[in-house]
Image (cartoon, rainbow, N blue to C red):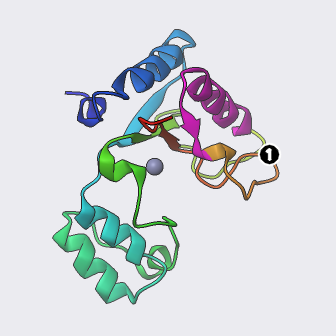
Amino acid sequence: MSKLQLLNSEVLRYFEDFVWKLEQQGLRYTILETLRTIEVQEAYYAQGRRPLEEINNLRKKAGLYLLGAEEGKKIVTKTMDSVHLIGCAADIVPVIDGKIPWNISKENAGLWLAFGRLGQEAGLEWGGAWSPYDRYGIGWDAPHYQRLRAA
Ligand SMILES: [Zn+2]
């Protein structure tokens, strides 16, 4: 089963359309996360804000792998009120030579932007359009796509 099937049924088709567009363009991608439990969100929110031991206790409870000291200092979410919790968001990233190009660079920025554009064309809001932006004009949450039912 695709992780997309965990999404809210009212918004699923927008994400399916996005993935279809990626496939049509021959772009390799992977779907990292769709619906998220409150336990996972709590562990993410603690990251960069709480001591490492506390973060890892939350991660254990949520069934996540444990973090090292450096990773534990990184803020990865701005909110406890994530759209992932209601199944209306998915993190979808490019894959180059079997790897996710996490460090956005001159070589891969165009690919991230192409993903963002196709997501927006599919009717999704792109986290890469949210400030602050990097030097390539890509916002802080480039993997993230969402669609609110009310929108
Ligand atoms: Zn996300």
Compared to 68, does 97 lie above or below? Answer: above
Q: Quadrant of residue 30?
A: top left
Residue shown at 47% from the left, 30% from the top: 29
Residue shown at 26% from the left, 62% from the top: 38
- Whether 51 is among the magenta residues is no
Residue sitting nearer the eye, 130 or 102: 130
Q: Quadrant of residue 45?
A: bottom left
Residue 19: horizontal and vertical position, in percent?
45, 21
Name the kind of residue labelled 1 in the image. Answer: Tyr
Region of the chain picked out in magenta, as a range: 108-127
Q: Residue furthest top?
A: 24
- Is 87 positioned to the left or the right of 92 in the image? left
Secondary element type, mark 1: loop
Say if residue 73 shows up in the picture: yes
Residue neighbourhood size for the residue with mark 1, other residues' Cα within 10 Å, grouped as few (<14), some (14–19), many (≥20): few
Q: Quadrant of residue 107?
A: top right
Compared to 116, does 43 lie above or below? Answer: below
* The N terminus lies in quadrant: top left
Question: Mark 1 — residue?
Answer: 136
Q: Main secondary structure of the magenta part?
A: helix
- Is 12 positioned to the left or the right of 60 in the image? right
- Is 124 positioned to the left or the right of 129 in the image? left
Residue 90: horizontal and vertical position, in percent?
41, 40
- Whether 113 is among the magenta residues is yes
Q: Residue furthest right?
A: 135
Residue 124: horizontal and vertical position, in percent?
53, 31
Say if residue 99 shows up in the picture: no
Compared to 86, does 22 lie above or below? Answer: above
Residue shown at 23% from the left, 81% from the top: 57
Q: How many marks?
A: 1
- Is 37 positioned to the left or the right of 68 in the image? left
